[in-house]
Amino acid sequence: MPRSKKGKRSSNKGSLRQEVLQLQLSAKGPLSLKGGVKGGSGASDDDLASDVLSHYSSASESASVLDEGTGAGEPLDDQIAQEETEDKLKQCIDNLMDKSAKTRLAALESLRGAFSSRLLCDFLIERRLTISDCLERSLRKGGGEEQAAAATVCAQLCVQLGGGDESEEGFKILRPVLSAIMIDDCASVTARQSCARALGMCCYVSAAEDGEDLVKSMSHLECVFNTSYPNCEGTLPTPKAGAPGLHSAALHAWALLVTLCPASRLTVLLDLHLPKLQACLESSDVNYRIAVGETIALLVELGRDIDREFEDSDQLCECLKGLATDGNKHRAKNDRRKQRSVFREVLHYIENEDFTEEKIRFGVEGIYIDSWMRRRVYDAFKEVLESGVRHHLQFNPLLRDIFGLGPPLILDSSVKASKISRFEKHLFNSAAFKARTKLRNKVRDKRADVM
């Protein structure tokens, strides 16, 4: 799901709102809002939009800062709360340079929680190089637990910086060390998994238009999960302890980056990886089988996107049917249930091109997960931001741009008291999907020459 650079995003927002309004006005019959405004009342487009949308204000960030020592419902002085938060963050940054590994790890965990639950872009831009240097030092010299925490904070830092030049600058510093740890067989498995997820997210956010960084990152990820592929005799290797989890993390990160590839590159990847991934459906680890199944569904979806005559093999469908109805008693009951649920959905899409839609709500808004590509992107952000993903969907301009939500909403009390109708949300998501598809195709064409 490619995007334009930070400075260019605003060019699509006006047209997206216009498309929504046109869909509303062209809908059958007058469209009534709960606030009493009707599509046929003669109001202008801006008047129609103003009942739901409001201009973006920096107050959204300050309002999102929570004071940890104050109970819910008590009045807060925003300025004081912001200063207290920044003082705590400054102390955490200082602790990243402490000699004690325990102190550094505690600081990383504190930053991890803060980056997940709050928007701190203005604060971090001034200190991004200092933080990047500290994270690089933790990755190079820290133990496995510290490396894993530092890698997660790396990904969160890129999300906080918003995918512009500042984020790209940090990625250039951290990419080599993230890749080195990920492919190091002597490193901690937990650290390698965390580095794989961080590499995928940082590259997706920071290097969406840089073909060279994209190819290098995908190549390093392939080196990790390629070891799960069948050997020349067609036999799957016996996985080492912790290897399936590492392979799953690398495969998911790779699948995220596949969504950025131009059509010419996608064709090569489909021919190379689909047959080998199909063989991996016989893996002994249920979570890796599920990761492989979801990746196959994504690749088929992308293949159909660039070639409507793209066909899957009958052998693949037979294999998916077996996994969707698997009743082997030697597998745990919960594993069988989880596997059947996922592979029923994969098989349904492969056979009927029908995706089971899911809605994610946050505040008065919501997004529809209506494709395998959209699910992979959402799951990737959820892995990095954890419980804070909904907060970022509400207020983070980067995520709102990626999911076609437009600028963050500032709602007055009358709008907060009434919910936006399901039909209006459907119209908005339809227009967002159309605009996102156009933009994705344009950016793919730009990268095709590089790759």
Image: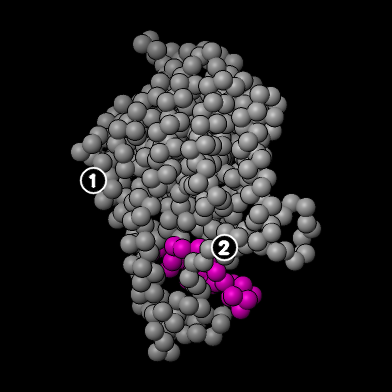
The magenta segment: 406-431
Q: Are marks 2 and 1 in contact (CB under 8 Å)?
A: no
Name the residue rendered at 46%, 52% in the picture: 398
Where residue 104 appears, as percent x and y from the top left, is 65, 29
What amino acid is at disc 1? Asp
| Secondary structure category for the residue under label 1 | helix
Q: Where is 237 relative to 32, above or below?
A: above
* Quarter of the rendering containing residue 170: top left
| Secondary structure category for the residue under label 2 | helix
Residue beneath label 2, please?
A: 60
Would residue 106 be found to the left or right of residue 328 on screen?
right
* Quarter of the rendering containing residue 204: top left
Where residue 225 appears, as percent x and y from the top left, is 45, 23
The residue positioned farthest toward the top in the image shown: 233
Where residue 274 appears, as percent x and y from the top left, is 36, 29
* Mark 2 to mark 1 CA distance (whole Å): 36 Å
Name the residue rendered at 70%, 29% in the picture: 103
Residue beneath label 1, please?
A: 445
Q: Does residue 327 appear in this view?
A: no
